[in-house]
Amino acid sequence: MAEKDFEKLTEKEQLIFDLIRKNPYISQQEIAEILGLSRPSIANIISGLTRKGHIVGRAYVLNESQQIICIGGANVDRKLHVKAKAQLGTSNPIQSSQSVGGVARNIAENLGRLGAKVTLLTTSGSDSDWSFIAESSSLYMNLDQVTQIPGMSTGSYTAVLDTNGELIIALADMEVYEEITPDLLRKQDILLSRAKCIMADLNCPKETLQYLCNFAKIHERPIVLIPVSSPKMSRLPADLDGVTWLITNRDESETYLNCEIKTKDEWRQALEKWLSLGIANVVITNGKKGAMIGNKEEGIFHIPSIETKEIVDVTGAGDAFSSAVIYSWLEGHKLTDIAKAGTVNASKTLQSAYTVRQDLSPTQLQKDMEELS
């Protein structure tokens, strides 16, 4: 859909537009005091901005270019490496590190680095962990719609690893995401109704995911669902008809569909089952065996994985795959190229020490794709 050509803003209109962008709930009196103008003058200028189509709805919702809205987890990921053999019931010397994570946040950063306009919609605590996430994320996504919940902790994932890097125990504090409720999202209905694409991960409660699916169908917005783990597959809505994309892995598909995927035929059958539920496009990744992607129009295709000789860190590879799939699809590519873009981005992320690879850009992804071909 072509975007409307708006009239050029005057200097005063631009100043007011910028103030409202920073704080959609700013009052006309506050704007007047900041700019040294009368409140009636501000009211007239805002009325003009609304008439021209730059502002829509209450709370001065800005009519900016369509954004991808990423809804779900934004965590602090901590790794605790035990220096010697782990012993229970006593103190263990460790080496620790922390980074930003969370499926929705990781996908938002990937997409932001790829040049997309992205808004992250999540809940957090009002704590130092959220400050750490915000500082690391704000360059790549809009964080204005993050809701801080008093008395709750920002989401965190802590992994305790032995001397070989194998997981001993993982601790996940994701309680704050239960606050991503339908009521919270109803306050964002104008933002969501204008979204270029809605992406939600399964950190969101089941009723929230169902609300989003219904909303996307009513407002004819594309919606992408991203599982987080096999146990959270129970959060998928009962009605998946109209979902635009589901990007899942073998374990998650086996759990939800109550089947085994050991052969290529079983893999294809699982994908066909997903499509029969009314989902338009489906991906099932399967580690070193690659990915299978399909829809009812183009068919089902197997895309081999890329041999990655040196794996630095597996963290974020799945999110890198999902991000490149969404990006490539929005760019209008065919299914096989969409899956190849995901595979390439995942492979490059495996070779990076970062959850989101630092060299990612539209030009770099295109170059990576050309090298593959």
Image (spheres, rainbow, N blue to C red):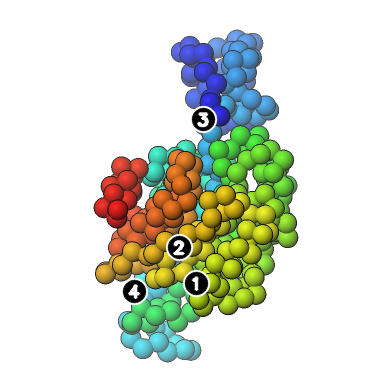
Q: Earlier in the sequence, mark 4 or mark 2?
A: 4
Mark 1, residue position: 264
Q: In the visual, does 301 lie left or right of 236?
A: left
Given residues 115 and 324, the one toward you in this image is: 324
Mark 3, residue position: 65
Helix or strand or loop: what does disc 1 sit on? Answer: helix
Q: Earlier in the sequence, mark 4 or mark 1?
A: 4
Q: Residue at x 31, y 67 (%)?
A: 307
Q: Earlier in the sequence, mark 3 or mark 1?
A: 3
* Residue 369 screen position, x and y as percent: 32, 51
Q: Earlier in the sequence, mark 3 or mark 2?
A: 3
The residue type indicated by label 4 comes to Gln
Q: In the visual, does 353 lie left or right of 219?
A: left
Mark 4, residue position: 95
* Residue 150 screen position, x and y as percent: 63, 53
User: Mark 4 touching mark 1, by CB under 8 A?
Assistant: no
User: Mark 4 touching mark 3, by CB under 8 A?
Assistant: no
Measured in 3D between alpha carbons, the distance from the residue under mark 2 to the one under mark 1, in whole angstroms, is: 9 Å
Helix or strand or loop: what does disc 3 sit on? Answer: loop
* Residue 304 screen position, x and y as percent: 39, 64
User: Mark 2 touching mark 1, by CB under 8 A?
Assistant: yes
Neighbours of disc 4 within 10 Å: few (<14), some (14-19), many (20+)? few
The residue type indicated by label 3 comes to Ser
Neighbours of disc 2 within 10 Å: few (<14), some (14-19), many (20+)? some
The residue type indicated by label 2 comes to His
Q: Residue at x 53, y 55 (%)?
A: 299
The residue type indicated by label 1 comes to Lys
Q: Residue at x 40, y 39 (%)?
A: 115
Neighbours of disc 1 within 10 Å: few (<14), some (14-19), many (20+)? few
Helix or strand or loop: what does disc 4 sit on? Answer: strand
Mark 2, residue position: 302
Q: Quadrant of residue 203?
A: bottom right
